[in-house]
Image (tube, rainbow, N blue to C red):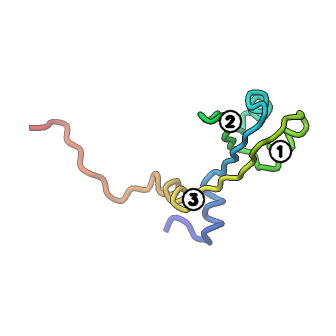
């Protein structure tokens, strides 16, 4: 057994939740949100993906800076992502490795 609890509890405890945000000034917003505990990445469509802050926190920072938000969406991890995070280091069987091929 790796974990014991309900699905929602399992997902919340293991997988990181992300916030997708689109704004009128993504560069300025990314700079305001960035910190040692927050990861901000820019997507090809101009939106940002933020890890380490809630939607409320992102919205508050944007409002304080006068940045208009066009989208603010919480993206919760799936059960599959939580399972993969939990079992990443738990390997029951491994394929044998060969150092030389005939």
The label nearer to you, 3 versus 1, is: 1
What is the C-alpha distance between the residues marked 1 and 2? Answer: 14 Å
Position above or below: 83 against 36: below
**Residue name at image x 66 percent, y 60 percent:** 12
Q: Mark 3 = which residue?
A: 78
The residue that mark 2 highlights is 40
The label on residue 59 is 1
> From the viewer's perspective, is residue 38 above or below residue 27?
below
Left/right of residue 66 with respect to residue 20 in the rendered view: right
Quadrant of the image occupied by residue 13: bottom right
In the rendered image of this protein, does residue 93 appear above or below residue 71?
A: below
Q: Nearer the viewer, mark 1 or mark 2?
A: 1
* Circle 2 SS class: strand
- Which of the two discs, 3 and 1, labels the residue nearer the N terminus? 1
Q: Where is residue 72 shown, x and y percent of the image? A: 75, 47
The answer to whether residue 31 is above or below residue 97 is: above
The answer to whether mark 1 and mark 2 are in CB contact below 8 A is no
Q: Nearer the viewer, residue 67 or 91?
A: 67
Instruction: Name the residue: 72% across, 34% down.
Output: 36
Q: Position of residue 50 (x, y in %)?
A: 69, 41
Judging depth in this view, the residue of 53 and 43 nearest the camera is 43
Left/right placement of residue 18 relative to residue 66 reads left
- Viewer-nearest residue: 80 or 66: 66
User: Could you give the CA–CA distance between mark 3 and mark 1, rounded to whole angstroms?
Assistant: 24 Å
Residue shown at the point (66%, 34%) measured from the top left: 46
Q: Could you classify mark 2 by the number of other residues whose Cα lies within 10 Å: few (under 14), some (14-19), or many (20 or more)? A: many
Q: Earlier in the sequence, mark 3 or mark 2?
A: 2
Pick the residue in front: 2 or 62.
Answer: 62
Residue 30 location (% of width, % of height): 74, 32
The x and y percentages for residue 95 are 26, 51
């Amino acid at each position: 057994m790796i974990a014991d609890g309900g699905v929602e509890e399992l997902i919340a405890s293991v997988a990181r939740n992300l916030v997708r945000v689109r704004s009128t000034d993504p560069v300025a917003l990314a700079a305001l949100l960035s910190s040692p505990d927050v990861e901000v990445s820019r997507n090809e469509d101009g939106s940002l993906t933020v890890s380490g802050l809630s939607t409320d926190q992102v919205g508050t920072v944007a409002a304080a800076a006068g940045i208009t938000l066009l989208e603010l969406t919480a993206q919760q991890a799936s059960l599959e992502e939580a399972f993969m995070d939990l079992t990443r280091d738990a390997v029951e069987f491994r394929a044998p490795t060969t150092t030389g091929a005939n």
